[in-house]
Image: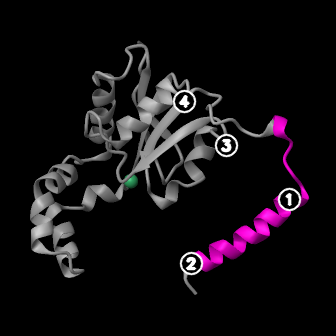
């Protein structure tokens, strides 16, 4: 059975339970993160729930922006756009980039990714049209710590981010559940 069917069935059960025990309006979380915090982290499946527990963040407290390898590359790319919304529309004052040990981006190469795309029927012309961007993106990730430093620097130096916004960098250990401070912004 496709997973979507399982999800839809689960949701029917979930909503019937919610409707039986409605949450009071007064305790519903706001779209404004009550810690005025945005987190940029990796899409890794092992982080779901685990990272939030490890750093004491729960529903309603932070904006969480995820991508493969918590990469910030473009001055006005999707990650920066989400940060801009977080700051100007949702009152975020502090940003934390959280990379992690054993990140899958460490082992990916442009060559291996392109070969897998070709093997799945993507045309050579399509690959050529993105080859430079794809290569730059994949090769921008050398190791999780350097990647965190680069992301913090790109946000701190981004012309659309106000100077007073704090931007920190942490490395999360999947094995130990610890966080190592890579950048502690005190400006
Ligand atoms: Zn990762």
- Report helix, strand or loop for mark 1: helix
Q: Which of the 4 quarters of the picture holds residue 131?
A: bottom left
- Magenta part of the chain: 4-26
From the viewer's side, name the closer residue of 10 and 94. 10
Q: How many marks?
A: 4
Magenta includes 135? no
155 lies left or right of 82: left
Quarter of the C terminus within the rendering: top left
Q: Which residue is mark 4?
A: 37
Which is closer to the viewer, label 1 or label 4?
1
Res. 3 mark: 2
Asked whether mark 4 and ligand 1 are closer than 8 Å, the reply comes as: no
Residue at the (62%, 79%) spot, across then down: 5
Dot 1, how many residues are within 10 Å of its Cα: few (below 14), some (14-19), or many (20+)? few
* Residue 170 appearing in the image: no
Distance of mark 1 from mark 3, alpha carbons?
Answer: 20 Å
- Which of disc 4 and disc 1 is earlier in sequence? 1
63 lies left or right of 100: right
Residue at the (20%, 46%) spot, across then down: 140
Instruction: Relative to 139, say whether 93 is above or below.
Output: above
Which is closer to the viewer, label 4 or label 2?
2
Magenta includes 17? yes
Distance of mark 1 from mark 2, alpha carbons?
Answer: 24 Å
Distance of mark 4 from mark 3, alpha carbons?
Answer: 12 Å
Asked whether mark 1 and ligand 1 are closer than 8 Å, the reply comes as: no
124 lies left or right of 41: left
Q: Which residue is mark 1?
A: 19
Q: Which residue is mark 3?
A: 59
């Amino acid at each position: 059975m496709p997973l979507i069917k399982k999800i839809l069935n689960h949701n029917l059960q979930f909503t019937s339970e919610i409707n039986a025990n409605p949450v009071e309006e007064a305790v519903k979380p706001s779209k404004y993160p009550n810690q005025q915090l945005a987190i940029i982290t990796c899409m890794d499946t092992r982080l779901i729930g685990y990272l939030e527990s490890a750093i004491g963040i729960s529903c309603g407290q932070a904006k969480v922006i995820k991508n493969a390898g918590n990469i910030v590359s473009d001055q006005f790319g999707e990650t920066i756009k989400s940060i801009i919304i977080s700051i100007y529309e949702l009152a975020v004052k502090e940003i934390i980039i959280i990379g992690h040990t054993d990140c899958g981006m460490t082992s990916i190469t442009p060559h291996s990714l392109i070969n897998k795309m070709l093997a799945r029927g993507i045309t050579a012309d399509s690959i050529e049209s993105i080859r430079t961007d794809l290569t730059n993106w994949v090769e921008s990730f050398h190791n999780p710590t350097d990647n965190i430093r680069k992301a913090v620097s790109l946000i701190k130096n981004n012309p659309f981010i106000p100077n007073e916004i704090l931007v920190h960098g942490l490395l999360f250990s999947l094995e130990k559940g610890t966080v190592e401070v890579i950048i502690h912004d005190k400006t």
